[in-house]
Image (tube, helix red, strand yellow):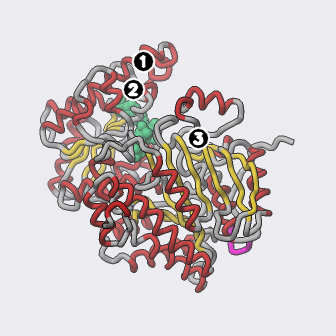
Amino acid sequence: MTSGPRPVRAHRGSTLNTLGWPQEAALRMLQNNLDPEVAEHPDKLVVYGGTGKAARDWNSFDALVRTLTTLKNDETMLVQSGKPVGVMRTHEWAPRVLIANSNLVGDWANWDEFRRLEQLGLTMYGQMTAGSWIYIGTQGILQGTYETFSAVAAKSFGGSLAGTITLTGGLGGMGGAQPLAVTMNDGVAICVDVDPSRIARRIEHGYLDVEATSLEHAVELAYSARDAKKALSIGLLGNAADVFPRMLAQGVQIDIVTDQTSAHDPLAYLPLGIAFEDWIPARESDPVGFIERSRASMAVQVEAMVGFLRAGSEVFDYGNNIRTEARTAGYADAFAFPGFVPAYIRPLFSQGKGPFRWAALSGDPKDIYATDRAVLEMFPGNESLSRWIRLAQERVHFQGLPARICWLGLGERDRAGLKFNEMVASGELSAPVVIGRDHLDSGSVASPYRETEAMKDGSDAIADWPLLNALVNTSSGATWVSIHHGGGVGIGRSIHAGQVTVADGTALAAEKLARVLSNDPAMGVIRHVDAGYDEAIETADRLDVRIPMNEQ
Ligand code: NAD
């Protein structure tokens, strides 16, 4: 019998529907990824990021639920691209679920072959946290964007964006987090988008403060907020390929320039000379010509970004591939400015830092507020973290099971995990929590256009690291472990691994958490020690991470 779409929502409360909390955690997080509040297209099992899915099809979803419900404490379910394919007898320390999503052999690793196999029902695109059952909604992108701008502030503006102006493009699903991330860092942002509905939507949701009526009006608003050291985000309707060069030519004082238009897909970038209303007919009637015009406009925009760079602004690519498209269009200097990872995030990655997240299986927001308090008490000196938690409590609406994300590194994650486990044991939390992370991570990703762009030793495409990461998390007691291909940047361009571990208040969970939440971020440190980064070498020394090649 074939089953079909239906609304899915995670079980709540402290009663088990399975034979143990590890299985229950996997079940609730699978269900939660498909909660209509969380998933973009739950009826198609699509969680986020284009076609990133939680299960291959509805029959597979039913089989996953059925299997998790009966899975014993010494068994492991194997998932091949969203479909459960076997249950093996293992042991209590083994993961309850092992997942491999979207993986293809090198020579076959391209979208065409992937789509062919997907059509045959043989694979599924797992993105990063969709097929590994730890997506928590838009809080993740807001926090990541906040952290990036916070790192820009730390590197170049004395720790705060107060008194600075950021110019950026794109107020879409991900790019829409930029204005709030800048104002959370006390800066001023001018955000350009061609679509008036995107501007209106961001204002309605409290992510964008005001809309300017013209370029001149935007500059006037920006200057007066900057001079008063007030945070303000300004939406400006226009084409970034037009606005950026005009601002440069007029000598507008911009401190930071970036872009999050959908440049990764030239059909999703509006070229100069085509009205917004004509976008869809223009790309449908002549896609090849449209792509050519779109790339040419990206080259114009990137040239202006390089102009700002030469005039002294801080300029970076925010992971949308705009530099590659501009270069394809013939603009040779497109790579004059760096990607955001080598520019700001790598020093954090070198300390094993990255997005760390947890969700309350009870469904009770009070549990997350209690963990917020615990984190603030545990890391009192971390100002960026305290500001984030305070602002997240004010501005982030939970989607699905209440969850929190913040950036923590080696030596911090295990402390947080053990504390949460104690809080479950003492009854301070009303049910267990799960602890995981994104695949935008320091030691579990090989992605030469993003996480591992421009590694110091040229090791960008070496994919042994994510495999070692999955193996070490499996050996350390993680509750579920996944290996994915193609997340973030597409098929053929990345290999990455994930882990999620349950804190159910037991002594066994404490043993597992202590290992997983040390070894997982330690992989980031050793990966960066191996590539020759000083911050990583210092972190390894300080936190006693053993590096055999450095031992005499
Ligand atoms: P989206 O499609 O939801 O939004 C893109 C926005 O760009 C739309 O609002 C569109 O109207 C606007 N736009 C298109 N052409 C324009 C032009 N010429 N001038 C001004 N505005 C224009 O996409 P999204 O989910 O917001 O993602 C944006 C891009 O950022 C993608 O390429 C994505 O891959 C990338 N991204 C990277 C990271 C990362 O590496 N950390 C994170 C998030 C997003």
Instruction: Left or right? Give the position of 224 relative to 367.
Output: left
Question: What percent of the width, then of the height, locates residue 361?
Answer: 62, 68
- The image's mark for residue 110 is none
Question: What percent of the width, then of the height, locates residue 366?
Answer: 55, 74
Q: Quadrant of ligand 1?
A: top left
**Is the residue under label 3 in contact with that under label 1 (CB below 8 Å)?**
no
Prevailing secondary structure class for the magenta stretch in the rendered image: loop
Residue behind mark 3: 103
Q: Badge 2, how many Cα within 10 Å: few under 14, some, many 20+?
A: many
Residue behind mark 2: 270
Asked whether residue 518 is drawn in magenta, I would say no
Relative vertical location of residue 11 with respect to residue 38 in this rendering, above or below: below
**In the image, what residue type sits under mark 2?**
Leu
Relative vertical location of residue 498 with respect to residue 377 in this rendering, above or below: above
Q: What span is colored magenta in the figure?
A: 12-17
**Is the residue under label 2 in contact with that under label 3 (CB below 8 Å)?**
no
On the image, which quarter does residue 316 sit in? top left
Relative vertical location of residue 408 with respect to residue 129 in this rendering, above or below: below
